[in-house]
Image (cartoon, rainbow, N blue to C red):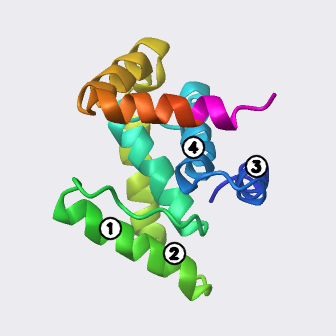
Amino acid sequence: MPEKETLERARQDKREGKSPSTQAGEFVHEEIEHIREGKHGARSTKQAIAIGLSKARRAGVDLPPSPGSSEEVKEQAKRDMRKARSGKKAAKSSKRSRATSKALKREGHSAASRKALSRQARTAAKKRSAASRSRAAKKAAATRKK
C-alpha cells in the first residue's frame, strides 16, 4: 500500500496537468526509498521500477504499458488497471503477501544505489532515438517551472 504522502504528491501532479508517467514517478521514487531504507530489497533496478509502476496503476494512475513491452507485462498492467477501476479491495492472501515480502527481503539493496540508477537511466536512454530524446528534453524545458 502506497504511503499517504505519495498518493497526495501523485494527485498534485495530476491536478497540475502532468503526464501519467510523472505521476507514476512518485511511486517509483517511494519504492527506491523503501529499498534504501532497508524495508526490502530488489534483484535489479528494473524490478524496483516495475514494483513502483504496478503500485501506481493500482492507485489509479492511467498508465498503459509501453508498446514494446512483453505480453506478460501487458497482461499484468491490464490486471493492475482493472484492480484500480473496480474500487473494491479484495482480501489479500496473507500467505502470498508474506511469501512476496520474504522474497524481497532476501534481495540486495544495491539496486537503489546512485550507480545502479544511473546505469539504468543510461541504458534506457540508449534504446531511444536521438529525435525522441531531443523531443523529451524540449518538452521538459517548456514545462519547467519558471
Q: Nearer the viewer, residue 14 or 130?
A: 130
Q: CA distance from mark 2 to mark 4?
A: 25 Å
Residue numbers of the magenta segment: 140-146
- Mark 3, mark 2: which one is toward the viewer? 3
Q: For mark 3, what is the residue?
A: 9
- Residue 119 lies, in percent from the top left, at 34, 18
Quarter of the image with the C terminus in it: top right
Q: Earlier in the sequence, mark 3 or mark 1?
A: 3
Question: Mark 1 vs mark 4: which is more N-terminal?
Answer: 4
SS at circle 1: helix
Q: Amino acid at mark 3?
A: Arg
Q: Residues within 10 Å of mark 3 (few under 14, many from 20)?
A: some
Residue holding disc 1: 76
Residue depth check, mark 1 versus mark 2: number of the one nearer the observer? 1
Amino acid, disc 1: Gln
Which mark is on residue 110?
Answer: none
Please give the name of the residue rendered at 27% of the width and 33% of the height, measured from the top-left corner: 128
Calculate the distance from the C-alpha at mark 3 to the C-alpha at mark 1.
24 Å
Q: Are the two marked residues, 1 and 4, in contact with CB atoms closer than 8 angstroms?
A: no
Residue to which mark 2 is pinned:
92
Q: Which residue is drawn at the image coordinates 50% and 28% (left, top)?
A: 137
The residue under the point 39% across, 48% down is 50
Q: Is residue 38 above or below residue 92?
A: above
